[in-house]
Image (cartoon, helix red, strand yellow):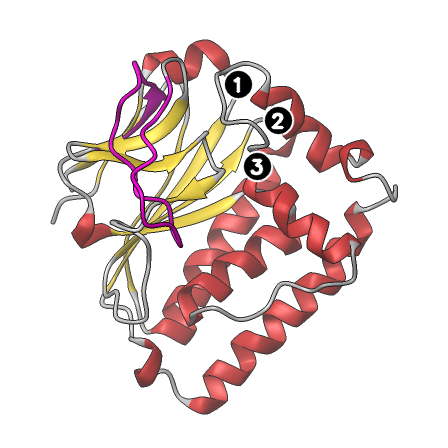
Amino acid sequence: MQKFVAEESFWELFPQASIGVVVARGMKGKDEVPASDAAEIARLLSDANERAKAYLTSETISENAPVKVWREAYRLFKTKKGARCSLENLLKRVLKDNPVGSITPAVDVYNAISLKHALPVGGEDLDAVAGDLRLGITEGGDAFAPLGEDEDDPTLPGELCYRDDEGAVCRCFNWRDGQRTALTDSSRNAVLVVECLEPERAGDLNVALDEFADLMERYLGATIAARAVVDREHPELVVAE
């Protein structure tokens, strides 16, 4: 991976959006994280589940403010039937008293950040990304093997997605990751994103991004090689060493 690029087709849809990007290198694998740190990460995730309840002012998931923003956003591009923002999926679990549980240390950290700050967060294995990582509207047909599935599920024409030279990386903006670039217990290098569509929450994005980078350093032993906010005036971030 050389660059993270938010293409013009993205900015045409969301001109006031901002995307926080962190490049973390040299992360510890799951088995290398001390038990005490793993327990602390689990505590942070549990605490974030509790904090997320503050954003849930209605028992109807679609009526909650952070979810409304993304429901409206998803109407602006082609999506798979039933596709929802990753943040909505996390908040729905909290609403149903089914807290988000542990997956891997890196994923647990980004789920904790997402829940605590009510912003979509994701991460990909930097070493598995082929060429530049691009966010934009696709003509469709990008290869995509969804996590947990056996069959290819290519992108749709007019879909907004993250993709690289080999196909889609995350479909429907921030709905679903693919197997090829997903973070695993042995991932060493990662590109991590925090997404914000509301200009009035730019400060929240920066706070979340700083906390994200700090936790990756503290508990995963990562070196933060890059930390930046991509916006329409600054649509690219070089991440190559």
Let me know if residue 234 appears in the view. Answer: no
| Residue 69 falls left or right of residue 224 | right
The crowding category of the residue bearing disc 3, from other C-alpha atoms within 10 Å (few below 14, some 14 to 19, many at least 20), is many
Verify whether residue 142 appears in magenta.
yes
> Three-letter amino acid code at disc 2?
Glu
User: At which x and y percent is residue 33?
Assistant: 37, 82
When the figure is inspected, residue 104 is found, relative to residue 114, above or below; the finding is below
Chief secondary structure of the magenta portion: loop
Q: Quadrant of residue 71?
A: top right
Of the residues under marks 2 and 3, which one precedes in the sequence? 3
Q: Which mark is residue 85?
A: 3
Provide the residue designation for mark 1: 16
Label 1 element class: loop
Dots 2, 1 in contact, CB < 8 A = yes
Residue at left 54%, top 50%? Answer: 208
Residue at left 15%, top 32%? Answer: 165
User: At which x and y percent is residue 118?
Assistant: 65, 45
When the figure is inspected, residue 113 is found, relative to residue 106, above or below; the finding is above
Which span is picked out in magenta?
Answer: 133-156
User: At which x and y percent is residue 238?
Assistant: 20, 37
Provide the residue designation for mark 2: 198
> Three-letter amino acid code at disc 1?
Gln
| Residue 233 falls left or right of residue 75 | left
